[in-house]
Image: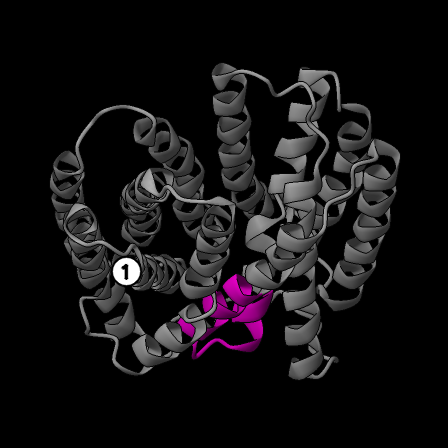
Amino acid sequence: MKTKTTQIRSGLLYFYVHFVTEVLCFFLLGRYTGDGVTLWLIPLAYDMLAFVPQSLIGAIHDRFGKLPLGMIGLGMMAGAISLFPLLRTPWPSLVLLCIGNGCTHVAGAEATLRASDGSLSPAAIFVTGGSFGVITGRLLSKTAMPGWPLTVLALTAVPFCLLAREDRLDADRRSARPCTAFRYHDPKLPPAVIVLLSVMIVAVRGYMGYGIPTSWNKTTAQTVLLFVTMGVGKAAGGILADRFGVRRTAMVSAALALPFLLCGDRVMLVSLVGVMLFSMTMSITLALLVSVLPGAPGLAFGLTTIGLFLGTVPIFFFKFTSVAANCTVIAVLTAVCLAAMHFVLRRDRPHA
């Protein structure tokens, strides 16, 4: 019972830390102004500097697990917001923001994965906090609110980091390799193949996330509802995977999402069902990577963020303007993901 409570608590603790992280990041991103080139370059630089280094940060934290990485990250992001109005150029604060973002993400992933005993729910709950934070940060950036209240918000997350860190260290004391309970990949396949296919799935999913047709989304309330639905889907994916099996949840949710995504361009309710089902696959690829890298959960999580960056890069250079073309690409990419997951995921054990 204590282990199960610790698992859920770690997820909930880092749900809040992740929420705060994205509020800070998207508040500051929303305050950047400039010409068209600047407003195009800053989001691209943010995605690159926040996502790609997480594999290196994760590898370092795998080796030096006692580093208070979450608190370091919060301090860097609070510093970025404090520096922003004082400097003529946005780049120092952007770099600081991105590195801090990477630190809190890796800390949350490692804390929830190491305390989970092979369960996906804690990591899925942790990831969910980001969806709520992104939309909150965007909305706050459009107000006249100064940045200093967000430095206070960052401080409120420090006790959550401390509690989750204790759970992580306790898991490390119980086992030298606490992530060995993740066994969701097909053991007959070479680990390198599984890593490559898993990163590809993340990249495809990242691209699809930006390409989902949602012409119905015209108001602030609808945008909030879209992000809330994404968050609910991410959490539901981990919870249902623990209940019904990772392979079954991944295949069924991805297949069911497709018709709702394709037919929901102008119908909000239909689209939201598709978005929720699509979001449920979020924790599956992370579980796959941890399965083949049980001694390096930080590196495994960092590989998923590299995949996300690879998936988002094309959006900055090319977008389909035709709904038909967009839907065709989504259908093809869904088929690719289904085939890859069928290939690499171990068959679920019979459900008792």
Instruction: Assess disc 1: are there few (<14), some (14-19) or many (≥20) residues with their C-alpha within 10 Å of its C-alpha.
Output: many
- Any part of residue 337 in sight: yes
Q: Main secondary structure of the magenta part?
A: helix
Q: Residue at x 20, y 27 (%)?
A: 145
Q: Is residue 211 above or below residue 169?
A: above
Q: Which residues are magenta?
A: 288-306
Mark 1: which amino acid? Gly
Q: Quadrant of residue 34?
A: top left
Which color scheme does this rendered protein use? one colour
Residue 33 placed where, x, y %? 37, 41
Q: Nearer the viewer, residue 78 or 277?
A: 78
Q: Secondary structure at mark 1?
A: helix
Q: Is residue 346 above or below residue 122?
A: below
Residue 272 placed where, x, y %? 64, 25
Quick check: 278 left or right of 9? Answer: right
Quick check: 277 left or right of 108? Answer: right
Q: Is residue 196 above or below residue 23?
A: below
Q: Residue at x 51, y 21 (%)?
A: 225
Residue 138 placed where, x, y %? 38, 32
Q: Is residue 227 above or below residue 86?
A: above
Residue 203 placed where, x, y %? 65, 59
Q: Nearer the viewer, residue 152 or 254?
A: 152
Q: Which residue is mark 1?
A: 100
Quick check: 225 left or right of 334? Answer: left
